[in-house]
Amino acid sequence: MSDILTTQRLRLAPVVEGDLEELFALHADPRAFADDLTEPLTDREQMRWVLDQWIRAWKQHGTGYLTVRVRARPTGASALPPGLLGVVGLTVLDHGGRQTLSAYWRVTPAATGHGIATEAMDAVLTDLRLGGTARAVIAVTAAANRPSRALAARLGFTPAPPERAVPGGRHGDILLIRPPDGTSPRTL
């Protein structure tokens, strides 16, 4: 598959089988999970299974996760490292008898602090083909994950009403909602 989104600095493309090694390296790096309740992966086969699910989601729903890489290297030295910078995207999640879009972002530690997740997720959330402008989008993160919560706030996510269950039901997670354009988050 080819790139489907570009920004000034980044190119985003649907995940493919050839991304396995780089995705495993990212998801096995404890530094990428420093503020998260999720444990890093320990086995390449775990990532292979996850990647298969991500590829299937693209085929089934026409939306999913995208790799994030540098769009074009400037002539001079770039502050961004080469290779995979992260993975971001929206996937359909069945929760409470309804389907909703769920946001995901994870950036390689070497690229943290350069606005990569904000730039990439902003492109994803505003792309009409991926559905983030017409539908509410949720994000689940650890309540104590301040960097993730700050990113979510920059992207327009707000805490869900307290009576709304958090998908996965893991203690310590919170649910955030980004309303569709023109909708109040409290009506979702």
Image: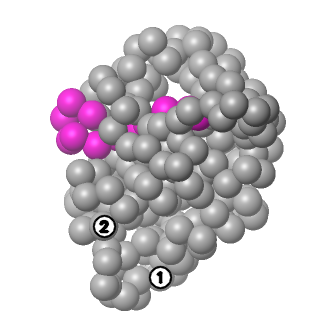
Q: On the rendered structure, is 145 left or right of 158?
A: right
Q: Secondary structure at mark 2?
A: loop
What amino acid type is highlighted by mark number 2? Thr
Q: Is residue 177 visible?
A: yes
Q: Residue beneath label 2, please? A: 133
Q: CA distance from mark 2 to mark 1?
A: 21 Å
**Residue at point 39% right, 20% down?**
16
Q: Residues within 10 Å of mark 2 (few under 14, many from 20)?
A: some
Foreground residue among 73 and 161 = 73
Element class at badge 1: loop
Q: Is residue 62 magenta?
A: yes
Q: Is residue 121 above or below residue 48?
A: below
At horizontal 28% and vertical 51% (from top left) the residue drawn is 130
| Near-viewer residue (98 or 4) | 4
Q: Are marks 2 and 1 in contact (CB under 8 Å)?
A: no
Q: Can you tell which of label 2 and label 1 is closer to the viewer?
A: 2
Residue stretch in magenta: 58-70
Give the residue pinned by disc 1.
Answer: 161
**Amino acid type of the residue that numbered disc 1 sits on in the rendered structure:** Pro
